[in-house]
Image (cartoon, rainbow, N blue to C red):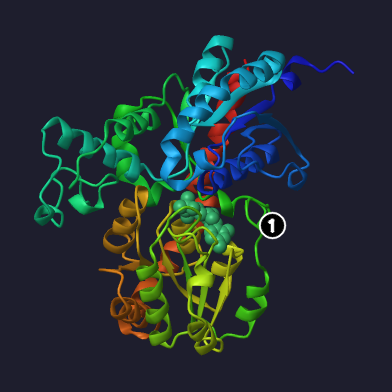
């Protein structure tokens, strides 16, 4: 049957950057827009492809990326970025050429910069999705200013100092290390990531009350409508599958046997890599804390050839069998929502941070790179719902866990986290800022389809 013009233009194409922390919010946004009546198309690389059978309501458009396993190793990510952008353009242009009559707009992760070229060519409106905070995006302006003033590399002794005009950040919280020369290729990547190109709007997976000032500052740079509609994971059905790795659900029945707020959950996300010394210090710190723990040791966590679970000595695993559980990948959102979990030792990736504060779970911050430094500073200093791990040693980990899980300071952090959780809940309910902004986004996309 022939469709009416209005129906034809209800298609939204979403293009994620193919890593867990970016795919998850893009799939969640797809689910939100689907619930508002849009038809959803996901254009995705073959590398780290989402599983189409988990999303029967969406149409998947695979893009041949020609990436090899070596291209996608952690140390090669910038290279992977340029290969993807080169190879995905032609197949994407072919799909869009065939579908353009049905497409209201394309929503993309700005790392996938080929999208803008294709969309401009075919005259399809685009919207950028930001999968991290405005505070993080804005912090890059401080880095560029330091570069212009020839102040990078800074002496190590200055890293604890506040960055002028970048409250609340210290030099050490900046997303790029200010104490070493920043390679031009990294700067090019950041410039490209910061660029919203010809986009008609920006969608944020954050909440106005947690990111208010940075959002306002960024409006001066990007003068297009902002739709601040997070936290996405609290708007979509909780069972929406977004994991690239298989979740080990056995940890939920283990958690069922633990006392309320007693378990420290430990995970460094999907990309961060640590060395064997840090792994050993973490293991000893956890054991010494005597607190029950649930520890995610994903197979690629160690920078050596061994898997982390293989590396950990058997005596640690035997000694802590009663105290804790190790899994390769957890159903994290369910874990954080479990009544037994009382704290999260995290790398402060934005999804993890958001998932934790949305459950009122206070954090111990061990940022590794990029936005994690900025998020950790906001968690510990602005929102005051977590502790900063000074260094990764057995002693500091043991101390941080005990402070968070059993100390008076931990109680205050938990109270503030619960308060923040309630405020965030308010923002997604009728009349709240994210709720209203989502309605405006739907109207905006409808207006683009003409
Ligand atoms: N995650 C998960 N199971 C795990 C560890 C992580 O499902 O065992 C999910 C987590 O819920 C989050 C995502 O992986 O949604 C990690 O994203 P984040 O932005 O926190 O960090 P990244 O992996 O991008 O560094």
From the Cβ of disc 1, is ligand 1 less than 8 Å away? Answer: no
Q: Position of residue 123 (x, y in %)?
A: 56, 11
What residue is disc 1 on? Answer: 239
Q: Depth check: give the residue in front, 66 or 252.
A: 66
Q: Is residue 207 left or right of residue 373?
A: right
Q: Is residue 411 above or below residue 274?
A: below
Q: Position of residue 4 (x, y in %)?
A: 79, 16
Q: Is residue 437 above or below residue 410?
A: above
Q: Is residue 289 above or below residue 247?
A: below
Question: Looking at the figure, which quarter contains the N terminus?
Answer: top right
Secondary structure under the numbered disc 1 in the rendered image? loop
Q: Is residue 217 left or right of residue 120?
A: left
User: Neighbour class for label 1 at 10 Å: few (<14), some, many (≥20)?
Assistant: few
Instruction: Find residue 379 and report its image quarter.
Output: bottom left
Residue that appears at 58% across and 66% down = 328
Q: Is residue 357 left or right of residue 155?
A: right
Residue that appears at 55% across and 26% down = 444
Question: Looking at the figure, which quarter contains the C terminus?
Answer: top right
| Residue closest to the far front | 305
Q: Is residue 49 left or right of residue 181?
A: right
Query: Is residue 434 visible in the rendered structure shown here?
Result: yes
Query: Is residue 426 visible in the rendered structure shown here?
Result: no
Q: How many marks?
A: 1
Q: Position of residue 284 (x, y in %)?
A: 39, 81
Q: Position of residue 392 (x, y in %)?
A: 31, 70
Q: Depth check: give the residue in front, 312 or 115.
A: 312
Residue that appears at 26% across and 61% down = 381
Q: Depth check: give the residue in front, 301 or 387.
A: 301
Instruction: Find residue 159 and report its image quarter.
Output: bottom left
Q: Is residue 172 above or below residue 126?
A: below
């Amino acid at each position: 049957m022939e469709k009416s013009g209005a129906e034809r233009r209800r298609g939204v194409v979403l293009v994620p950057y193919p890593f867990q922390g970016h795919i998850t919010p893009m799939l969640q946004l797809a689910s939100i827009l689907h619930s508002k009546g849009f038809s959803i198309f996901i254009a995705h690389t073959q590398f780290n492809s989402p599983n189409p059978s988990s999303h029967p309501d969406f149409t998947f458009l695979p893009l041949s990326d020609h990436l090899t396993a070596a291209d996608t190793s952690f140390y090669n990510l910038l290279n992977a970025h340029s290969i993807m952008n080169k190879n995905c353009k032609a197949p994407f242009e072919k799909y869009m050429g065939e579908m353009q009559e049905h497409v209201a707009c394309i929503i993309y992760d700005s790392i996938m910069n080929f999208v803008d070229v294709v969309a401009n060519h075919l005259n399809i409106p685009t919207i950028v999705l930001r999968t991290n905070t405005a505070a993080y995006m804005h912090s890059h302006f401080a880095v560029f200013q330091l570069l212009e003033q020839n102040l990078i590399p800074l002496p190590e002794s200055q890293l604890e100092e506040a960055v002028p005009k970048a409250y609340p950040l210290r030099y050490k919280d900046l997303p790029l290390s200010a104490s070493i020369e920043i390679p031009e290729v990294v700067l090019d990547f950041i410039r490209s990531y910061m660029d919203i190109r010809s986009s008609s709007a920006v969608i944020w997976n954050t909440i106005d009350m947690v990111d208010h000032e940075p959002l306002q500052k960024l409006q001066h740079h990007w003068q297009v409508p902002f739709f601040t509609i997070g936290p996405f994971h609290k708007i979509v059905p909780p069972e929406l599958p977004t994991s690239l790795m298989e979740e080990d659900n056995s940890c939920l029945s283990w958690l069922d046997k633990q006392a309320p707020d007693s378990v420290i959950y430990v995970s460094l996300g999907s990309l961060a890599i640590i060395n064997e010394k840090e792994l050993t210090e973490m293991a000893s710190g956890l054991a010494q804390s005597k607190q029950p723990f649930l520890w995610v040791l994903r197979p690629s966590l160690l920078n050596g050839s061994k898997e982390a679970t293989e590396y950990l000595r058997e005596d640690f695993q035997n000694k802590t069998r009663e105290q804790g559980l190790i899994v390769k990948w957890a159903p994290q959102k369910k874990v954080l929502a479990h009544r037994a979990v009382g704290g999260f030792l995290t790398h402060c990736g934005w999804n993890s941070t958001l998932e934790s504060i949305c459950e009122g779970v206070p954090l111990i911050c061990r940022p590794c790179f990029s936005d994690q430094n900025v998020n950790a500073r906001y968690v510990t200093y602005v929102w005051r719902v977590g502790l900063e791990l000074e260094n990764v040693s057995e002693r500091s980990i043991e101390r941080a866990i005990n402070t968070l899980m059993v100390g008076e300071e931990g109680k205050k952090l938990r109270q503030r986290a619960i308060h923040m959780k309630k405020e965030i809940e308010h923002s997604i309910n009728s009349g709240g800022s994210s709720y209203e902004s989502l309605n405006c986004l739907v109207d905006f996309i409808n207006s683009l389809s003409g």
